[in-house]
Image: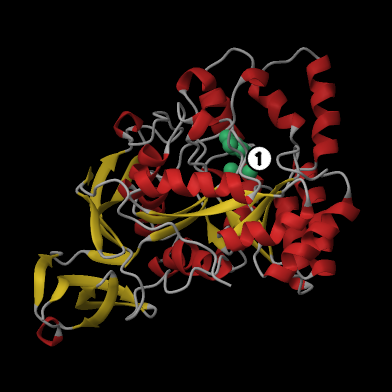
């Protein structure tokens, strides 16, 4: 019996190096990685023309929206954007309408995604109103809980550390991580009131209202709770030097913490925010050049665990408003992350090994995504083929995402995802989505 597919004439990144080989896929999984002569006969053969072949990106921070926010993004447009960007698995954030915060709302989202998605989707849940519901949410398949320290999303009072500890203890028993948006609500509220009193409506006022201290303070608070409860805490989008220091202190003390940074916090700073205004508005905001340098330094020393897009789509009308206080924060990133990072590789600031570790291997490890995150025999065939020499300009009008704007618009990049395979199926080919909706998997927590 021939196997389903053989990809040949590839440069495959496997076990820490690039090998010239082919890859046999059967039943959605990688059966063999070997020289072409050693691969089994296949129903379909595809010549990858010597292109670099990497594990598909696992993006642990994606807002796919849908439901009452479908005008911003839905499971079809969001996962098409993922496929176009070489992302084979997204973990969906819970700040939806309605909020994902119990097994019923989670099941509903899974049902919607199942019919529409073209890449694998896993889910976060916010904390439920009643902590007794934590186990049922995990049993339903949530990969992790998400906690917003900046505002109340879900059932917890974020100012109450005792309650947060109870919640973390519950989650620790279930063995899933808690991802945290770390900006301290009280600091934000005080600073915002100060700023609004001055009558300012500009983006710099917005940044002043969300200072790095708010990030550092929230990280310190949560790190203590991580230590006390033993729960694995993943800090989302660390953005500032002092926030990073708070994180690194906890990590060095052996607290169970990991963190991610976004491409926009690595590649943009407050100067870009001044130029692009509300289009580049995001929470936490873009920081100073000094902060950006600190993030890169930590990244190069191996202290950053993951890179995540924080794909946060809004309409252009919601972004381009007069007063910054009315603007929606968020940048769509699914279609720019890999091209931007491949450009960093081509310019020598990142290695392919860094890229794969930060965008596939570590996210799979942190979120317990079994048999994913690297190209190895037995693993799911989640693959992205890239043309590392292709030069072009980012053009947000071509995005599959409904959010057709980007602070990276017009940027010259080198490196393009040309084919994306999800569970062994070709879903994107030369920028076209070629899979039927609903062909991917809903990935559920398995204890
Ligand atoms: O910039 C952001 N946008 N930060 C968040 O925390 C939420 C997100 C969104 O959902 O738009
Ligand atoms: Zn966030
Ligand atoms: Zn987010």
Specify whether residue 287 is in view.
Answer: no
- Looking at the rendering, the quadrant in which ligand 3 lies is top right
Instruction: Give the image location of residue 26, x and y in percent.
Output: 23, 74
- Rendering quarter of residue 38: bottom left
Residue at (32% x, 73% y) in the render: 13
Q: Which residue is under mark 1? A: 284
From this view, report whether residue 218 is shown above or below residue 225: above
Asked which secondary structure carries label 1, the reply is loop
Position of 380 relative to 336 (above/below):
below
Task: State whether residue 84 is above or below residue 252.
Answer: above
340 or 417, which is in the foreground?
417
14 or 273: nearer the viewer? 14
Residue 124, position as x, y percentages in the image: 59, 52
Residue 66 visible? The answer is yes
Q: Residue at x 42, y 30 (%)?
A: 403
Residues packed near mark 1 inside 10 Å, few (<14), some (14 to 19) or many (20 plus): many
* Quadrant location, the C terminus: bottom right
Label 1 beta carbon less than 8 Å to ligand 2: yes
Q: Residue at x 36, y 46 (%)?
A: 115
Residue 362: % across, % down:
52, 68
Placement of the N terminus among the 4 image quadrants: bottom left
Q: Residue furthest bottom?
A: 38
């Amino acid at each position: 019996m021939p196997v389903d597919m053989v990809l040949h004439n590839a440069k495959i990144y496997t076990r820490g190096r690039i090998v010239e080989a082919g890859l046999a896929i059967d039943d959605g999984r990688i059966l063999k990685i070997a020289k072409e002569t050693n691969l089994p006969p296949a129903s379909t053969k595809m010549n990858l023309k010597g292109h670099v072949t990497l594990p598909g990106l696992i993006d642990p921070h994606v807002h796919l929206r849908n439901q009452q926010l479908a005008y911003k993004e839905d499971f079809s447009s969001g996962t098409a954007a993922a496929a176009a960007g070489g992302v084979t698995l997204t973990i969906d954030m819970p700040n939806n309408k309605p909020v994902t915060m119990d097994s019923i709302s989670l099941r509903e989202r899974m049902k919607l995604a199942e019919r529409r998605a073209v890449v694998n989707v896993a889910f976060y849940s916010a904390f439920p109103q009643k902590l007794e519901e934590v186990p049922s949410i995990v049993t339903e398949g949530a990969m992790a809980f998400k906690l917003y320290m900046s505002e109340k999303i879900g059932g917890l009072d974020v100012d109450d550390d005792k309650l947060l500890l109870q919640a973390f203890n519950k989650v620790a028993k279930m063995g899933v991580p808690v991802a945290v948006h770390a900006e301290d609500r009280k600091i934000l509220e005080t600073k915002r009131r100060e700023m609004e009193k001055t009558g300012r409506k500009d983006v710099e006022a917005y940044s002043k209202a969300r200072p790095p201290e708010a990030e550092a303070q929230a990280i310190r608070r949560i790190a203590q709770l991580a230590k006390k409860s033993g729960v694995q805490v993943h800090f989302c989008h660390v953005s500032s030097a002092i926030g990073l220091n708070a994180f690194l202190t906890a990590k060095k003390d052996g607290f169970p913490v990991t963190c991610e940074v976004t491409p926009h916090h690595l590649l943009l700073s407050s100067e870009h925010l001044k130029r692009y205004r509300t289009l580049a508005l995001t929470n936490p905001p873009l920081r100073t050049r000094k902060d950006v340098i600190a993030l890169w330094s930590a990244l190069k020393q191996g202290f950053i665990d993951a890179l995540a897009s924080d794909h946060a789509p809004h309409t252009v009308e919601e972004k381009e408003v007069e007063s910054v206080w009315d603007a929606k924060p968020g940048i769509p990133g699914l279609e720019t992350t890999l091209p931007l990072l491949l450009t960093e590789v081509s310019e020598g600031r990142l290695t392919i090994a860094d890229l794969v570790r930060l965008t596939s291997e570590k996210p799979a490890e942190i979120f317990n995504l079994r048999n994913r995150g690297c190209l190895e025999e037995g693993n799911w065939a989640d693959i992205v083929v890239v043309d590392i020499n292709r030069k072009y300009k980012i053009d947000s009008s071509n995005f599959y995402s409904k959010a057709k704007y980007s602070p990276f618009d017009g940027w010259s990049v080198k490196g393009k995802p040309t084919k994306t395979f999800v569970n062994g199926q070709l879903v994107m080919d030369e920028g076209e989505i070629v899979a039927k909706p609903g062909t991917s998997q809903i990935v559920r927590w398995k204890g």
